[in-house]
Image (cartoon, grey):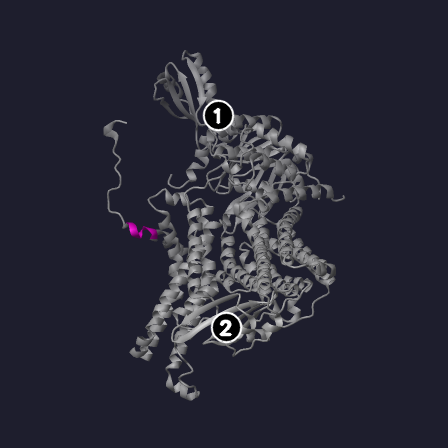
Amino acid sequence: MTPPYGLWWAQIRAVIRLEMKKTFFARRGLWVYLLALAPVLLFMGRAIDLMRVRETRLALATAHPVSAETLQSIDTGMTIDEVIGKLGEPDSRRTFGRRRRGPVVMMSYTDGQDDYTFTFIDDELRDINRRDHPSLQQDSLIYATVFQFFYLRLAIFFGCVGIFMNLFRGELVDKSLHFYLLAPIRREVLVVGKYLAGLIATVVIFTTSTALQLWMLLLPYDASAYLAGAGWHHIAAYLGVTALACLGYGSVFLAAGLLVRNPIIPAATVLLWESLVMFLPAALKKISVIFYLQSLCPVVAPPDRDMNPLLALLVSNAKAPPAAWAITGLVVLTLVILALAGMRARRLEINYGTD
Amino acid sequence: MAVYKRTYKGYSGGLTPAWSRFLILPRYSFARLFQSKFLLLFFLACYIYPLGCLGYIYLAHNLSFLKAFNVSPNLLKIDGTFFLTFCSFQGAMGYLMTAFVGPSLVSPDLTNNALPLYFCRPFSRAEYVIGRMSVLVYVLSLITWVPGLILFAIQWSLAGWTWAKDNWWIAGGLLVGSAIWIVLLSLIAMAMSAWVKWKVAAGTLIIGIFIAGAGFGAAINSVMRTRYGSLINLSEVIATVWAKLFRVNPTTGIDLFDAWMSLAAACVICLWLLTRKVRAFEVVK
Amino acid sequence: MTAPPPIEQSLVVLDDISRFYGEVLGVNRVTLTIPSGITSLVGPNGSGKTTLMNIITGLVRPTRGSVRILGVTPSEPERLFRLVGYSTQFDSFPKGLTGFQFIYSFLRLFGYDHAECEKLAWKSIERVNLVEAAKRKVAAYSKGMRQRIKLAQALAHDPRVLVLDEPLNGLDPLVRAETIALFRELALEGRHVIVSSHILHEVDMISDQVILLSNGYVVAEGKIQGVRDEIVDHPMEVLIRCNRPAELASKVFHEESVVEARLHADGGGLLIKTRDANRFYRLLNHIALNGIEIESVAPMDDNVNSVYEYLIGGEEPGR
């Protein structure tokens, strides 16, 4: 007898429709939106700040032009008068009084691109701080760091925990799962339907966030050259990695919600494991979602400069797998986990009193 | 009803003091808490580090040991740094303890509609919150300032009155530093437990606030090229306050005033969340 | 898998069902055959009624034994739940749905299209008189309304077997009467309506057969009168209304099967306890021919309440 694919597909759509109300349009899902929105706001703030600073610098440079060569010719040890003699009056000047010592004077100049701040103590130039004009390349590295170390590991991770664990375990806590189990739907089809509902929700929320973040990142710059080159490939890669993260983490946490009563333990275990991935040997790295996701990211995040030197010694690098392997591996992992979840769902009983 | 049939009389006996009635709530919580073997083991494990510190203090005053290993007495110093490290380690254990204990404070009452049962009696919301918090305060105290003060007392007894006179501020630092951390953790745990009805979700949120806060704070610092992002990293914020209390130079880069403001803001937000959620009724629109 | 015999395809069959929750007994060695009509599960709290219903509907698997509902086992939910509708005792619903959405959304799981689901949903809502409240959120419903919407959801797909766990809970008297009428209507259509209830006089009124449960065991099953007849430990109690009860008492005392006779408190009748009701009724015919005017003869304990009292009431602590 051929399986009733038409019926299963109709049932999956019905489950997705039911779940959409609870994931997309429920107040209890608000925090997932906030998690996704936070980095967008961060990059938006950055974009606004960059554009504002650039305008201010240009205005100052127009009103008081100073060349970069002149600024670079200033050296420590010079007096305030010598510096003013070469560069003219500063764009801004601040004086701080200190007990038992002479005042500290800070003077700022700009050449329209970079900011220079000269710090004088007792009328002697002690420190030159140059704040570079940010470049798209620098910001791409910053974005890569934020994406791989915050967005993937924390925002998407916790978002998937919240959405996918609610699919079964949350229904058991709400005492509403029995309505599904009393419908003429195969348990495996139910698992697939709920998984797809969670996947659609997380992919839409987090890829939209990724797209907005990238837009905010590119907004202060003339990105036409970047987009003509590797730009669109990078954007597609980031969106793809976001979707794959939802795919991989989603299956893990859906299964966790079915298999264990307290899914916080597997969530904490996965979080800890993923955090330690950089220190694990190559063979163990392969048993993690983040290893494959990071290998698919278009820009390699620079190492953490603030990391403890002892810890830095323990970092082990492994050869990134080819993209096709990484994607296949994640998809296969997802399918295996979903199959296990389906088997568990088949044996599921309703016993709300113990939850 | 005929007057002669009205035989009901209200209770006219003595009443327990009003201020102590909130203690009804933790009474059963403690019994339930330590029924969990895992929690009991974790609680006992929280004393491993203090015992290690005790050994360290003993060795620092054991001249024959120092001579035998050619260790300079100045190497094993018991000072502000020593107690700051103690406070930090036990603070971390307290954070984990909160993640285990905190979710069961308010969530079950919300899930089982027990709040109306409390508030239809002469029992205020403040008493309810204090009663539930007292569970965490008690447990966290046992693993933070209590062993810390014991270590201070032992060090005092071994080092003498001069040392105590010069380092009395360490005891103050232990008390105040632990109190701030306990209040913060307790309020966060209560607020998260009240905000979500599911204990597991509350536990995830309690953990997530610190981890996601640290991550997002680092992201803000990286993107905006500032240090203000660290203000949402509560671990760094409290580390700044502790460093000041124990007179150690902080490495977090956060201004002390900003750190206090951040802690105050976190507490206010938690209190606001509690005010919204701890009610005798729920409005469904 | 061999097909069940034709007769079983019209029955709900439980064969040697046991269910343990660890060391706690849910139900033990329950063998039942439930025909169409209204069957009531009666028993004190914790007797296993809900466990039995959960086993019938596959929400819980038995530790031992087998279940077949109209020839279908609970391991085939795709087939089973087209035949079965279950209104559980749980007073919780998926969040954020209106009454209509609740029924409509779960009908879509049957694979029906939008128009069909709408039609079935409204039909079912009309049956339970919730049309005006259908567009409001279920979370804002009163207890009685929530009970009715659950019933509507169980009925919506027109099942042949209805399993209803305390369906009259929280309903006002008028709605209660309407709901009972609905059950009768469904039973007359040849459906199996399995109801659990504590309200014994209603069970008496509506049930075609009863199943009495106590401590996880089936204590008695069948039609009420049949069950009563088999309880020989407790003589039947009969009230005879007549013009000369004292004289009637003197005449029946000689009868061997009569164990007790006492005047009714109002003086207009005689309460008899007899071990053989049929023989006693034949005796009454003779007595009536001898001048005593008998107005009515009514069994006093031929009901679920009394059966419950005799079979289960004595097992409860403190009695």
Local secondary structure at mark 2: strand
Q: Which residues are magenta?
A: B18-22
Frontmost residue, C144 versus C68: C144
Frontmost residue, C148 versus C105: C105
Frontmost residue, C306 versus A294: A294
Q: What residue did someone put label 1 on?
A: C174
> Would you call the spot at circle 2 few (<14 residues within 10 Å), some (14-19), or many (20 or more)?
many
| Residue under the point 65% across and 34% down | C117
- At label 1, which amino acid type do we have? Leu
- Same-chain check, marks 1 and 2: no
- At label 2, which amino acid type do we have? Thr
Residue furthest out toward the top: C291
Residue B20 covered by magenta stretch: yes
The answer to whether residue C66 is visible is no
| Residue under the point 36% across and 21% down | C264
For the residues marked 1 and 2, what is the alpha-carbon distance in whole angstroms?
Answer: 88 Å
Against A89, residue C306 (above or below) is above
Local secondary structure at mark 1: helix
Task: Tell me where residue C266 sits by quadrant.
Answer: top left
Give the chain of mark 1: C
Q: What residue did someone put label 2 on?
A: A119
Against B135, residue C190 (above or below) is above
Query: Residue C201, how many percent across, how many down?
Result: 46, 28
Q: Is residue C49 left or right of residue B159?
A: right
Against B259, residue C33 (above or below) is above
Picture disc at residue B4: none
> Would you call the spot at circle 1 few (<14 residues within 10 Å), some (14-19), or many (20 or more)?
few
Against C155, residue A326 (above or below) is below
Give the chain of mark 2: A
